[in-house]
Image (cartoon, helix red, strand yellow):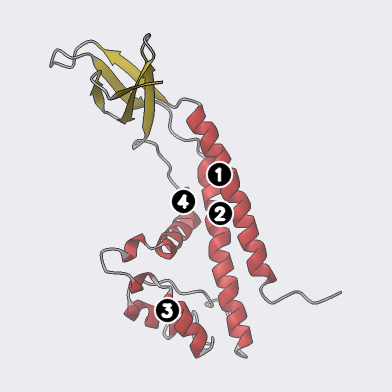
Amino acid sequence: MAPLHPLAGVVEKLRRADTHIVSLYHEVVAYANGSPYSLTAHRDFGDSKAGFMFHITKEPPLHLSTIVGDAVHNLRCALDYLAAELTVANGGNPTRQTQFPIALSEADFINQITRLGKFNTASKSAIKIASVYQPYRLDQDKCSAHPLWHLAKLSNMDKHHTLALCATGGSANTVFMHPDGRRFVSEFKDGDRKSTRLNSSHA
């Protein structure tokens, strides 16, 4: 039996994460197709105009958070497996502290490498490459939007409590059909009030 490739575990974790992400996509589509909102007609908003009020009426089911957590866990594990294999490739032995560093500042990155010992036994070239992909490489006002920073936050949150999902910021594109064939289209957001003076086009 041929030995496993050193990164076989990394690949399997990524595949598992992809399975969860695909499952999440289908679950979200099913939720959205279940009409988790209401569109109520109003005769008068106080300005003598008829219109519609859009509201979210059903929050996403709790089990979606477990799928998100499973996907996040596998993605984070893939990075940590990579850190362990890079340590081995450099002649070191992974410890309980071995972890792929994710930092918002260069100082924090260095601290994770040295004092916390997360990645200190990897090669200098591996550390340099890891630093290139860090959130702190972006502008200060953008680094907190970096995918790796979101991954780190979600991973830490999921370890301690259920991830909270909500749809209070939902929206929907609604099409109204006039008897003469015209289509009236408008985007509604939660709490929005729209009059019937919408853009129209013929079908």
Residue 5, how many percent across, how many down?
72, 75
| Residue under label 2 | 71
Res. 43 image quadrant: top left
- Labels 4 and 2: the sequence-earlier one: 2
Q: Which mark is residue 24?
A: 1
- Asked whether the residues under the numbered discs 2 and 3 touch, taking CB atoms below 8 Å apart as contact, a structural biologist would say no
Would you say the residues marked 1 and 2 are in contact, meaning their CB atoms lie under 8 Å apart? yes
Three-letter amino acid code at the position of disc 2: Ala
Marked residue nearer the N-terminal end (3 or 4): 3
The reply to whether callout 3 and callout 1 are in contact (CB within 8 Å) is: no
Which residue type carries mark 3?
Answer: Ser
Name which of mark 2 and mark 3 comes first in the sequence.
Answer: 2
Mark 1 burial class by Cα count in 10 Å: few <14, some 14-19, many 20+: some
Task: Tell me which residue sits at (30%, 14%) in the image.
Answer: 41
Q: CA distance from mark 3 to mark 1?
A: 31 Å
Residue denoted by label 4: 161
- Give the percent coordinates (x, y) of residue 19: 63, 51
Tell me the CA gap for discs 2 and 3.
24 Å
Mark positioned earlier in the residue sequence (4 or 1): 1
* SS at mark 3 in the image: helix
Dot 4 lies on which element? loop
Mark-to-mark CA distance, 4 and 2 = 16 Å
- Kindly check if marks 4 and 1 are in contact, taking CB atoms under 8 A apart as contact: no
Query: What is the three-letter code of the residue carrying label 1?
Result: Leu
Decide which of tag 3 and tag 1 comes sooner along the chain: 1
How packed is label 2: few (under 14 Cα within 10 Å), some, or many (20 or more)?
many
Horizontal relation, residue 126 to residue 93: left or right: left
**Residue that badge 3 annotates:** 131
